[in-house]
Amino acid sequence: MTTAPDFGVSLELNLVEQRIRESLASEEPLLTEIAEYVIASGGKRVRPLVTLLAFKSVGGKSVGRVVDIAAALELIHSASLIHDDINDGGMERRGRPAAYLKFGIQEALVTGDFMFTKAFRIGGKFDDDIVDMTARVAAGLAEGEIRQKRHIGDVTLGPEEYFDIISRKTAMPIATGARIGALIGDARAEQIEAAGAYGLNLGMAFQIVDDVLDVVGDGVTLGKRPGMDIKEGNVTILSIHALQDGSVSDRSELIRILRKRSKDWGEVQTARRLIQESGAVPKARSEARAYGERAVAALDGLPDVDARRQMRDLVEFVLSRDV
Amino acid sequence: MTTAPDFGVSLELNLVEQRIRESLASEEPLLTEIAEYVIASGGKRVRPLVTLLAFKSVGGKSVGRVVDIAAALELIHSASLIHDDINDGGMERRGRPAAYLKFGIQEALVTGDFMFTKAFRIGGKFDDDIVDMTARVAAGLAEGEIRQKRHIGDVTLGPEEYFDIISRKTAMPIATGARIGALIGDARAEQIEAAGAYGLNLGMAFQIVDDVLDVVGDGVTLGKRPGMDIKEGNVTILSIHALQDGSVSDRSELIRILRKRSKDWGEVQTARRLIQESGAVPKARSEARAYGERAVAALDGLPDVDARRQMRDLVEFVLSRDV
């Protein structure tokens, strides 16, 4: 699994990694093993990158503190992924079998709890406002998951509801990470707002691209089987466009597949093809780009330093990634 | 479902209840509904009782703070119960269907996460040492659950390993609640130790009685089907005694049932009968009483006030409860 380039913060990223691993020590070696399995899968580390870059961009000095909070946020993210995979029946994650498949559902569930605990042990040492923001991220993930479940197979879902769901599940956590990074870097209020706006728009772009890749990506590069959104009946901006723009017969076939509870992979492939043929992919990519541009625009509110240029590069990376 | 008497802290208990409910507000009404369902089931509220009484016994004044932390600890406890029920296939809890059966596994899992989050939002505002203690309680629950799973169907489990498991899953969390209650009440160091020793021993007694009731209790009073430990292959001090003291043929039958993965309820009943016939129940009850006596002895380290007398009564309640 490829990770993102290091964007000039490889040292700090390594410290985050180290902080996470330290925190996962347990008298129950199985808990540590499962948690490390999930963490070692790597992923793109977009969240800690955003937090670290926001911190650096405002000239932050207290590296130890930003490393701690980035570790806490990544732990929360990883814990929620473990639980999401259990909930969604996700088979692969970052190129490896999902934790619950490798270690068992019960073991994976408890490991998620354990990682939440460790996140809050780290995050709980910060000031009340940061504790609040961190807890809100975690609560928002739970709320986003429930909201998404509520709309499973809902072919009437509109773009606004879709954007609302992904902002809760992906963009707001990234925005909060950016705000906290700037806050710990002793930023001024308007810089914190700028960092938050950057994170929010970057997060939206990130999730739209993720949803695009579920339609156009290939399993080897992606590290997971594409089509999972369709398989699970998650209506994304891609299927929303296809349901609006496709031919009548394509639309009714797509509706049938999205609504159906147990689909086979042949049907999932059909749906991916129908979505591609509708022209939904370039439309979604251009929406992602629009969010990316807003993220770049928000950077005007931050000092003109190296880290800010890296934040601009990160937008490009997120928009052009194929994994 | 009967709750415990209020032990002179009904006002504070109500505040804890209120604090929990306030914290569960969510834009996703389903999350609030599931969480309130679990909380409304009541339970015996032994944990908040211990925290509140320890606080009062040392003359604590900052009621708002102790109410907050008792609410956080009860939220952690309830969240872990939701996840445990998913893991163990528990059908009933406090006289009502388990949350995952009523609302669905995915919904219950996410609600557990949501409640953890809310607990840490409250708990994260305290000083580092209390954050640490609280996080350790939550991590210990995960570790205890994994350790218990590791010994499923393990008929070689000895009393020491059993006591170790229940101390992690039940007694240490209660001990920590007592210590935190005393700490927030501005207790002296040795009073905090005394409160902790009280909580630990009370917790051990509580769990042993719980395990006794799984063998002798009836479903109506208990609010859940008895025999779940046997059904799940959890080896408790009851089966440990029975495996030591029963007749050769009874022992091999009990071993067969405990080891078997999918038992029917007839076999569970047989195992309950074999355990009772072995004389394990009075033996376990006397062990519970020994812990109860140690809890009472620990009270010598606390001021001679009403709350201390209530703590003594709570020991009696825990030992004599049939629910």
Image: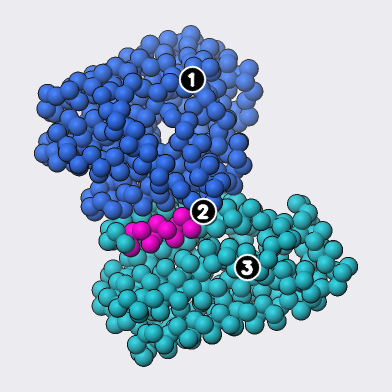
Chain colours: A cyan, B blue
In the rendered structure, the residue with mark 2 lies on which chain?
B
B249 vs B97, nearest the viewer: B97
Q: Nearer the viewer, mark 2 or mark 1?
A: 2
Name the residue rendered at 37%, 39% in the picture: B18
Amino acid type, label 3: Glu
Residue A138 is one of the magenta-drawn residues: yes
Q: Are marks 2 and 1 on the same chain?
A: yes
In the rendered structure, the residue with mark 3 lies on which chain?
A
Name the residue rendered at 73%, 68% in the picture: A239
Identify whether A250 is placed above or below A53. Answer: above
Q: Quadrant of the C terminus of chain B?
A: top left
Percent from the top left, x then y, of residue B191?
14, 34
Q: Residues within 10 Å of mark 2 (few under 14, many from 20)?
A: few
Q: Can residue A25 be seen in the rendering of this structure?
A: no
* Quadrant hosting residue A216: bottom right
B76 relative to A42 in the view: left or right: left
Residue at which label 3 appears:
A160
Residue at which label 2 appears:
B27
Amino acid type, label 1: Leu
The secondary structure making up most of the magenta span is helix
Percent from the top left, x then y, of residue B13?
32, 32
Pick whichever of labels 2 and 1 is earlier in the sequence: 2
Residue at which label 1 appears:
B222
Real-space Cα distance between discs 3 and 2? 17 Å
Name the residue rendered at 41%, 87% in the picture: A300
Instruction: Report the magenta residues as a range.
Output: A130-140
Q: Can residue B198 be seen in the rendering of this structure?
A: yes
Q: Residues within 10 Å of mark 1 (few under 14, many from 20)?
A: many
Q: Residues within 10 Å of mark 3 (few under 14, many from 20)?
A: few
Residue B275 is one of the magenta-drawn residues: no
Q: Secondary structure at mark 3?
A: helix
